[in-house]
Image: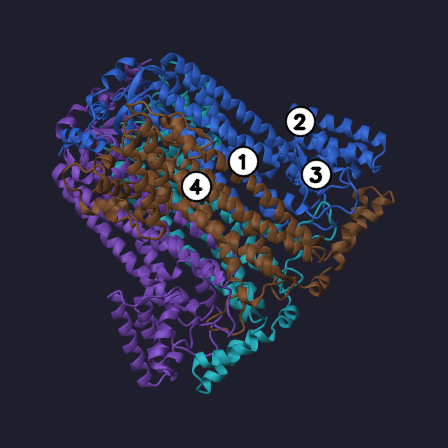
Chain colours: A brown, B purple, C cyan, D blue
Amino acid sequence: MKLWAKGYPIDKEVEDYVVGDGYLLDQALVKYDCRASIAHAEMLGRIGILSPAEVKALVKCLNEITGLDAKGKFKITKEQEDCHTAIENYLTGKLGKAGKKIHTARSRNDQVQAALRLYYKDELKNTISLTLRLIASLRRFTNKYGRIKIPGYTHTRKAMPSSVGLWAGALIESLDGDIGLLNFAYKLNDQSPLGTGAGYGLPIMVDRAFVAKKLGFARVQNNPIYVQNSRGKFESTIVHALSQVMLDLDRVSRDLIIFSMPEFGYYIIPRELTTGSSIMPQKKNPDVLELVRANYHVVNAYGAMIQGIVGSVPSGYNADVMLTKAPAMRSFEITERSISIMALLFSKLKVDEEASKRAMSDELYATAKVYDLVKKGVPFRDAYKRISSKYKGK
Amino acid sequence: MKLWAKGYPIDKEVEDYVVGDGYLLDQALVKYDCRASIAHAEMLGRIGILSPAEVKALVKCLNEITGLDAKGKFKITKEQEDCHTAIENYLTGKLGKAGKKIHTARSRNDQVQAALRLYYKDELKNTISLTLRLIASLRRFTNKYGRIKIPGYTHTRKAMPSSVGLWAGALIESLDGDIGLLNFAYKLNDQSPLGTGAGYGLPIMVDRAFVAKKLGFARVQNNPIYVQNSRGKFESTIVHALSQVMLDLDRVSRDLIIFSMPEFGYYIIPRELTTGSSIMPQKKNPDVLELVRANYHVVNAYGAMIQGIVGSVPSGYNADVMLTKAPAMRSFEITERSISIMALLFSKLKVDEEASKRAMSDELYATAKVYDLVKKGVPFRDAYKRISSKYKGK
Amino acid sequence: MKLWAKGYPIDKEVEDYVVGDGYLLDQALVKYDCRASIAHAEMLGRIGILSPAEVKALVKCLNEITGLDAKGKFKITKEQEDCHTAIENYLTGKLGKAGKKIHTARSRNDQVQAALRLYYKDELKNTISLTLRLIASLRRFTNKYGRIKIPGYTHTRKAMPSSVGLWAGALIESLDGDIGLLNFAYKLNDQSPLGTGAGYGLPIMVDRAFVAKKLGFARVQNNPIYVQNSRGKFESTIVHALSQVMLDLDRVSRDLIIFSMPEFGYYIIPRELTTGSSIMPQKKNPDVLELVRANYHVVNAYGAMIQGIVGSVPSGYNADVMLTKAPAMRSFEITERSISIMALLFSKLKVDEEASKRAMSDELYATAKVYDLVKKGVPFRDAYKRISSKYKGK
Amino acid sequence: MKLWAKGYPIDKEVEDYVVGDGYLLDQALVKYDCRASIAHAEMLGRIGILSPAEVKALVKCLNEITGLDAKGKFKITKEQEDCHTAIENYLTGKLGKAGKKIHTARSRNDQVQAALRLYYKDELKNTISLTLRLIASLRRFTNKYGRIKIPGYTHTRKAMPSSVGLWAGALIESLDGDIGLLNFAYKLNDQSPLGTGAGYGLPIMVDRAFVAKKLGFARVQNNPIYVQNSRGKFESTIVHALSQVMLDLDRVSRDLIIFSMPEFGYYIIPRELTTGSSIMPQKKNPDVLELVRANYHVVNAYGAMIQGIVGSVPSGYNADVMLTKAPAMRSFEITERSISIMALLFSKLKVDEEASKRAMSDELYATAKVYDLVKKGVPFRDAYKRISSKYKGK
């Protein structure tokens, strides 16, 4: 039964439309809602809404749910709408009165944000740790191949001498910058929304600091309207941070797709990381890199989705924000898997030293020739022109 | 087994990353791939690749798959990657040699497009028919309430007298315009890709016109590179067309959310179409309209997703385009369900004639007063100024 | 003076914010507003609001403005806000009473749409004609080089034999499809908004059909609310159509950037179409192609801008839509210039037959070898596997 | 003359297409390029490329340009392409040999980034200071009106009692969070790119730390490829930060547009901040708020523009990134003006205490009634149901 059931039936098609696949996404939130509900129950104990026995029973029952969920045995049904209803129904079914009290001093509006933020915190930590693993993989790759010279390109045209180490180092430094942004998103998100109710506070005194501390939030998010206005807004910054990691992976995938073409051959992608064609027997395709490339745009679009949804509503909770959950969750999944697959790739990627050497052609040294003249005292622009005249082409 | 398996294993994580949830989306394509495969098999019979007995056996077996699929009994596994592999494997398992011949003169690149286009054609037809149903619902609503006067607003400020009929009529005409765009998308998509192989034709003569006719395509899409370059491009126009319908629904939802507020009360959304709050017992929330509103932005972002993916790759097939399937399919689902729910809503929506009447306040007639003077010969701009001076405000 | 001035001053910063650079964009609309105003004046003559002498004077004066504008001598000032005010002020200044009557039976809301649609119609026609010119350029290019064989790529890997003609032909057919969409956008836009006032009709009888015919509109757009709701909506479809042309140019630019690298050398971009580097004297960079590529994303984002703006407001005119003018106008400018530059490029682009020939390596014929076996009766999948085993790689 | 001129003419249309309106945008960068060039010249003095006299002359001349530019007397022509060329040409024209040496040990690729980052740093500081000014304006507004009770809404339906102070406080806290993000963007951007040349370092030893310190950069950005890959990437995070401020302003504008409708009347926008209609004499429209609302979507789309452009190219400099300059610059302009106008608005906005009081109707206290029962020991869910039954509606 829905938490807000009023004794008359809701149109079935309306119910379906409103719930959508939200109840499926919510499966990942069960454990976080249980954690938040435990802290909430303990707080309700402290302010005298729940007896110690009730708190104990609720905590036990919530841990039970977490255990069931870990084994895939706590299933949210479409009728229940979301994990919050499923959990409250379970508690009421098992404990009666104590279950009916758990929702005191909270609303689904602050409750869902608590669960989401705990989830985001875990996912952000995971994303950072995967990024560090990728950096480690890049370092090992650089140790092995870093000194090999390859052409540096601008405008997809040979420019100046570069090296495998310089190229991989750019990715390492860029990822390092991304970690800074992921950490910023983490901190932004590390505020407890609990105790703000539906967005206008509660007609009862609560201990917000206790709950925040219990759940490991760095601080309490004060203004209740701000809490509701943060829904989607924080997600927007989170997904922006993810998109920056994806941009780095996109960039390096593009480089690898081109320079692992046999026509260049600087990089060799081992065959077990490639896929084939249903018709052309010779093909070894870099699908992985192509999909990483495409997934940058997917994550970007999820960011735009969130930005579009939140930028068209007034203050306070609006049902629209429910639809920011899926793009945020999917963006995490895509980014984490993409980082992981790139770490794998760099652990197996080879550099063909011979092919790279062959590619180090004369024009890459044209700038060096300019500087030979500069070092002899020729003003740069004159030196440039002198060398330039040899490359007029047609 | 994959169609392109070469006798060495592919890394499991790579496989997972490449397949993603594509195999789940492909479930909707099984029947279309069977239809296309039947036409293809018959063509292979005509050009002598298959014997009449082989054609017969394949057609029977493909119909069998369609039947199983209709009962939910033809499941694509992750290992099979997609419906095309699942189907070919089934055919080969059942028929041996004939199954091994079915992929003659095609590639997955043209095959997947054939299935997708047949699917898009059906979905576009369905979208159009739902839109017509919504228009019919609007007409019934207008017949009932159309003559009731309500204020017309510009800048969310009372402007001039309007009516329920004028307002609903705007939606009808706009949807009618959208049907034009949906029809354009239908025609664009109504071209047979089969017979173009991987994007560079086939080393064998085929009868493309026969296949196209058999499948009900209006024409053959000639250039094989263009066929591949169309993947994602056609989807982009399809999703654009869907987004235009969603824009209309977004607009009308915004109107209804505001003007069904008890503070206005022009429109009454029956309680069975509203939802409640977990904490505030009095609430009757227009979640449906809020979600329609948000879903416009969702469909838009799916359009941007497709445009991003296709706009970053060279000509010919690239694995990136696989990721245009999900946003296209989800956009159909969202749009169709949104149209349907709005048809339901308008069948139940009420207009409060009294409340509307009360809202018809004096300032709505200020322009009429200007025209009273105009009719007496006062130049418009002078008449405007004369009336305007009464509305200086502060 | 503003048309709506009420005798008290408006805050200067507010004025600046509201006008923005709209008055600069409006310069391009002067001639269209004059055309629409002439038709409107003639209609006012027919319904007796203006005397024949007034009509004559107004028409003469409006033609005068058009003439001044053509010579760059009719400048809209920031204080005037827009071309409509500048023109009405000019008429009133010159003609007195007749000028004060010109705004009878219209609002800026329908007036601006009339001017914009006339402008869009011209620009769409121009875009189509430029696209036809590009197709002609491509045909000449194909006549010259079309028969030259080049490798066909999928996944940026050699796939099967292709040719310059096949490649250029794909672009021709795709552009042809785009013209269909541009024509659709043209027709959608080819409706007269005049006579619908601010969005709720007029307190006076007008002859909408006369004005529509006079201005060359294919039909009258009936519902006045729909007219206002179309602002931005029509622009969205127009910019979508432009983005499809840009996508084609993006695609072909990507091909050219890669395959004109000296490492491939299939295509030669003449030096006068390339740019250089401030530091590297040897560089000949394909900036033009890179900017066409980037401009696809620019036009896309302008489309998203419009979709975002229009998808967050209720029915009827809202000031938000003013900001859809710039992205629409800029999208036309970018697209038209991009088409034109590509026509120029294809008129000068060369194909290096020798380099292309060298690139036609063995693996391109692997599929042909499969079909040699197929023609001897080997089932396709077996033939595929047999040939495939030779390409296992490592 | 262009820096890379090679003695043969470039096609005029190509030149136009490549330069676009970049030379106009570059006017804002002149002073930053001069500052960076001064630091660069001093460094060249330290490493012996320039004599002390040459350094002195160059510094003097660069200060001269800055002075001219401040007076609007240093105009970049289209032929010069950009500020860098205009400045180098000026120096060479005035100083001869010393001017020809200024480009030693740099490329336009690192030079343009230096100027842009100095510009972004100033603009970010300005944005932060404007945001603080808006917060101050909000605090004054709150001091005056904060205690007034207004209805709190969820789903655009009356929910629970709120107050003007709670509402304005949400904006203050949200802006405070935005300042955190702006500061992050500032730090990300606060790295010196100078000394990395075209993206692959320089064939000469330079003192990067000296230049960085001289220009006030917090640190040197090490990897030269990363420097180039940062172009557009840093802009993406900057524009994301701006979009978060705009989102706050969008939200509060939506609230104000609705609740300043005479039908609610909680807020009164003074007439000097409103605009009128060309046809309806009574209108006082909140154009400013509508445009702030629309401008959120404009800034968002500029963010998407940048993300699209940078996500489709390989590593190293590509001309595409030139097109990230305009969206970044325009986003600053829009955001800064929007913050400023909102500070003005809040300094003049009034709250109608009477109207607000009238709106505090019974149903806003339904939740309080539930808690009255809760305080008497009724379990929350039972209390909810008891009160809920009184609000069944129809």
**Which label was assigned to residue D69?**
2
* Image point (65%, 40%), residue name: D81
Are the residues tagged 4 and 1 within 8 Å (C-beta)? no
Disc 3 packing (10 Å; few <14; some 14–19; many ≥20): many
Q: Position of residue C112 (x, y in %)?
A: 37, 34
The residue carrying mark 4 is: A120
Q: Which of A289 and A46 is in front in this view?
A: A46
Q: Do labels 3 and 4 share a chain?
A: no
Label 2's element? helix
Looking at the image, the residue that sits furthest to the front is A53
Q: Kindly identify the amino acid type of the residue bearing the numbered disc 3.
A: Leu
Q: Kindly identify the amino acid type of the residue bearing the numbered disc 4.
A: Tyr
Q: Position of residue A349 (x, y in %)?
A: 61, 61
Are the residues tagged 1 and 3 within 8 Å (C-beta)? no
The residue carrying mark 3 is: D194
Q: Position of residue C381 (x, y in %)?
A: 44, 78
How far apart in space, not on screen, are marks 3 and 2 (Cα)?
23 Å
Disc 1 packing (10 Å; few <14; some 14–19; many ≥20): many
Label 1's element? helix
Task: Decide which of tag 2 and tag 1 comes sooner along the chain.
Answer: 2
